[in-house]
Amino acid sequence: MALRPIFDEGPLVDTVLKQVDAQPGGMVSGSIHIEGGAHPVNIASVNLALASEIETDDGDRAAVIEYDKESIYGTLWLPPGGREIIDFELPLAWDIPLTHFYGQALGGTSIGVATELEINGGFSSTDLDLIAVHPLPSQQRILEAFHNLGFHFEGAFCEEGQISGLDLSGYDLLPFYQEIELTPPPGQTYGITQLEVTFVAGPHDMIVVLELDKRGGLFSSDHEVFGSLVADHRTSLQIDWEKELDHVLRESGRRRGLF
């Protein structure tokens, strides 16, 4: 982004990313360029955070939520017109939402790096510098399997809170989770109208959560069926996921009388 003042006649700040493409558990690096304004200023802290747009429990689109904030530089005295460049590396959570698949934006999910200067006891931030979060190879393989089964990607969104009904104690969770929306192929026999996929990832494995919409009419309930699979990142690349997912979806439908 271009240099921009964080308050009238105050410092200008510009965050420059070395790369915009990343993966869960990876790193984003770059440099923060700060230029002094009309008056000397004491910057108490230079902070970086990741930010995403989420949906609240009532379904309304919420403001951007910041998370994984880190102080990357302590006290900095900046004279009028002075310049400072701060290099940084910001780790990404394993559970960070995905924004791209096959190099294309999933739609509905954005991840940005927000720069924040603490000055005079207050905080001022730059605009977001967007990054593209691509699936891990294990996640890519599962999404490819859904694609090969004829599912169509509708988009993705992040929902506030945590997934209920699963033991996620071994995972470092964000204050929200992502759902990737898929529409089943025409003439499918799974008994569903929509499938939502959530990846709960860690450094060694992940849980693939499947949330199904029942096929039905006016009195059918939404999002009532949960299924989940545990997948090891390394060995999951050797699994026939088309066969496995097809079996799981068919069995879920039969057990719950969806068809």
Image: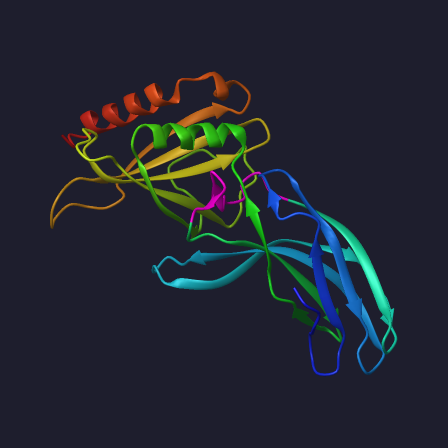
Question: Is residue 74 visible to us here?
Answer: no
Q: Nearer the viewer, residue 213 or 80?
A: 80
Q: For residue 58, which quarter of the picture?
A: bottom left
Estimate the x, y position of residue 20 in percent, counting from the top left. 62, 48
Q: Quadrant of the N terminus?
A: bottom right
Q: Quadrant of residue 31?
A: bottom right
**Residue 199 position (above or below residue 109):** above
Asked if residue 255 is positioned above or below residue 93 in the image, the reply reads above
Residue placed most toward the observer, 71 or 134: 134
- On the rendered structure, is 214 left or right of 96? left
Per the picture, the main secondary structure of the magenta-coloured stretch is: loop
Question: What residue is at 44 percent from the left and 63 percent from the top?
Answer: 62
- The answer to whether residue 252 shows anywhere in this view is yes
Numbered label tally: 0
What is the x, y in percent for residue 43? 80, 69
Please, is residue 106 above or below residue 41 in the view? above
Q: Say whether residue 5 is magenta.
A: no
Horizontal relation, residue 205 to residue 166: left or right: right
Of residues 75 and 234, the one drawn nearer to the viewer in this rendering: 234
- Residue 28: percent from left, percent from top: 67, 46
Q: Which residues are magenta?
A: 92-106
Residue 80 appears left or right of 150: right
Which residue lies at the image location 37% right of the left edge and 48% below the top edge? 155
Q: Is residue 96 magenta?
A: yes
Q: Quadrant of residue 127?
A: bottom right
Residue under the image location 51 percent in, 36 percent down: 135
In the visual, does 252 lie left or right of 174? left
Quadrant in which the C terminus is drawn:
top left
